[in-house]
Image (cartoon, rainbow, N blue to C red):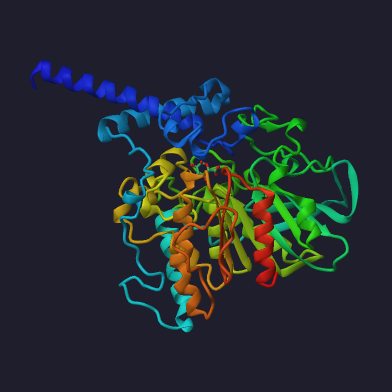
């Protein structure tokens, strides 16, 4: 090889490495963020593009918010830096390509073709409910294999200790009608243990209540101002207010209480159970070692295993372990468990609900890409972008579809269908373009034939309704709340109307 040619190649490679490094610096700055709307709380600009750290979807693509690595712990700093170099070298030289910018053009988004939710592996359609159990299994395998990864088969011992049983104290007042229980749930296997703090609010005047259960982003103490709720001891994102060196402080109490309107939910006779998602699996890429992954070191042990369980699968599996406890808890109706989640935890609620039939009703709030919205629309957050920003959420197979959504032989409407015939509610927000509200609605619409197969009504609408106008009288409900990516009282009010109508 001629010298000038070699030098030119080396120079080009160097430029690519530098570009890739910048990209990874930005991606790692977002990685593990447990709730980017925290910028809003800390005085940042309100964002309609939730994952974008900027003030709008397009701004986000400039990769504006750079988190200095000095905020990370030493060990993590070293691994981030070495991963940056490694991935930059490999990624920059081998691929040398950037992720496509997000699409917000409906004309481009509507150019896709979905398979029927009743179609089996060879395209054959199932015709009766008797075929449903086998078909549902096929759907679940499809998602475990291609997207979320398989949870472990091995059993774990679930032990529970009541650490508090008293009356709620909200807004400084003792609430005679609300019982507060805090349970330490221990998952044990082969001498290893994971502790999950489960906080349960239940109406004192009812012998038994249906219960909304969902994970929270910042620890149980963040979900209400009750001073008795234990501060989480699990990993927290240092960018969130009230967190110092990845640990929650008193200052974080109640800082997401608007997402958990306990008094208003309890007023309607429901119980609420919540746990910090980090107790199950801290939300950063550690090569699948910490959290519940660590209980099953032998389970698809190679980090590069194509269908190894990612964090969404781990959180969903954790929700099922909490259901093990809740279904036996005095005062909770085991037939009244409803799983709810916002954003990444909305994706989690859908996957948990699809797998575990004890969740009689499933609620997805602003779950977006990898949740309720159709990937093949490639509107807002794309598969490539989510896999790059959050490399630990999904399995490796899912990366095959990075910027290749047209090659997907499945889509999220089949995930909704896998929940059938149990009722499912999908909520979007009008400014949350990143999560593709129309794509979220269309998943529900296209899942409808699975509900009709069971003699239930699905969702007829194929167009977004007016804001704050819930639709769907049957087993699939939908609303487009006016405003930003968030979980607010308005959303809960619609979930409760839907739950009531469906017998919860
Ligand atoms: C990011 C991510 C979304 C996710 C959201 C969240 O915005 O891109 O996919 O839903 O974070 O969970 O907070």
Where's the N terminus, which quadrant? Answer: top left
Q: Is residue 139 above or below residue 275?
A: below
Q: Position of residue 115 (x, y in %)?
A: 35, 66
Q: Is residue 273 visible?
A: yes
Residue nearer the viewer, 365 or 283: 365
Q: Residue at x 44, y 45 (%)?
A: 303
> x and y percent of residue 61 in the render?
41, 32
**Lateral position of residue 450 relative to residue 115, left or right:** right
Q: Residue at x 30, y 49 (%)?
A: 404
**Figure label count:** 0
Residue at image coords 40%, 53%: 375
**Residue 30 as seen in the image, left or right of residue 292:** left
The x, y position of residue 394, in whole percent, is 46, 49
**Any part of residue 192 in sight:** no
Q: Is residue 354 above or below residue 42?
A: below
Above or below 12: residue 231 = below
Give whichever of 293, 111 is nearer the camera. Answer: 111
Q: What is the residue that sits farthest to the front in this orientation?
A: 466
């Amino acid at each position: 090889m001629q010298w000038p040619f070699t030098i030119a190649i080396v120079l080009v490679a160097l430029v690519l490495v530098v570009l890739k490094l910048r990209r990874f610096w930005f991606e790692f700055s977002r990685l593990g963020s447990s709730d980017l709307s925290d910028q809003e709380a800390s005085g940042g600009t309100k964002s309609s593009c939730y994952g974008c750290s900027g003030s709008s979807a397009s701004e986000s693509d400039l990769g504006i918010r750079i988190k200095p690595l000095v905020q990370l712990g030493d060990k993590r700093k070293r691994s981030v830096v070495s991963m940056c170099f490694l991935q930059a070298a490999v990624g920059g030289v081998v691929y040398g390509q950037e992720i496509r910018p997000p699409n917000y053009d409906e004309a481009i988004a509507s150019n896709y073709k979905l398979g029927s939710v009743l179609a089996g592996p060879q395209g054959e359609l199932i015709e009766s409910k008797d075929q449903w159990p086998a078909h549902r299994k096929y759907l679940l395998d499809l998602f475990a294999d291609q997207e979320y990864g398989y949870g472990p088969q091995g059993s774990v011992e679930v032990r529970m200790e009541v650490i508090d049983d008293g009356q709620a104290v909200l807004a400084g007042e003792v609430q005679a009608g609300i019982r507060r229980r805090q349970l330490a749930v221990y998952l044990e296997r082969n001498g290893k243990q994971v502790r999950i703090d489960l906080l349960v609010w239940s109406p004192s005047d009812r012998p038994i209540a249906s219960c909304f259960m969902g994970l929270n982003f910042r620890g149980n103490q963040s979900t209400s101002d009750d001073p008795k709720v234990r501060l989480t001891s699990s990993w927290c994102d240092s960018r969130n207010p009230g967190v110092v060196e990845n640990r929650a402080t008193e200052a974080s109490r109640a800082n997401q209480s608007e997402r958990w309107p306990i008094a208003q939910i309890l007023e309607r006779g429901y119980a609420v159970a919540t746990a910090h998602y980090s107790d199950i699996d801290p939300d950063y890429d550690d090569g699948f070692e910490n959290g519940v992954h660590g209980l099953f070191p032998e389970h698809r042990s190679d980090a590069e295993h194509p269908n190894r369980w990612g964090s969404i699968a781990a959180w969903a599996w954790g929700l099922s372990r909490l259901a093990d406890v809740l279904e036996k808890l005095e005062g909770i109706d085991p037939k009244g468990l409803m799983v709810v989640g916002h954003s990444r935890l909305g994706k989690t609620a859908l996957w948990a609900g699809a797998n575990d039939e004890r969740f009689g009703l499933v609620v997805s709030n602003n779950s977006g890409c990898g949740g309720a919205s159709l990937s093949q629309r490639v509107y807002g957050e794309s598969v490539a972008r989510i896999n790059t920003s959050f490399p630990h959420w999904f399995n490796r197979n899912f990366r095959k579809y990075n910027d290749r959504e047209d090659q997907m032989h499945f889509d999220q409407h089949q995930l909704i269908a896998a929940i059938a015939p149990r009722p499912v509610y999908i909520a979007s927000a009008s400014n949350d373009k990143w999560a593709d509200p129309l794509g979220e609605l269309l998943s529900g619409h296209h899942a409808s034939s699975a509900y009709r197969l069971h003699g239930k009504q699905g969702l007829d609408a194929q167009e977004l309704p007016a804001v704050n106008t819930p639709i769907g009288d049957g087993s699939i409900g939908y609303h487009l709340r006016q405003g930003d990516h968030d979980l607010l009282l308005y959303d809960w009010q619609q979930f409760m109307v839907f739950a009531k109508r469906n017998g919860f």
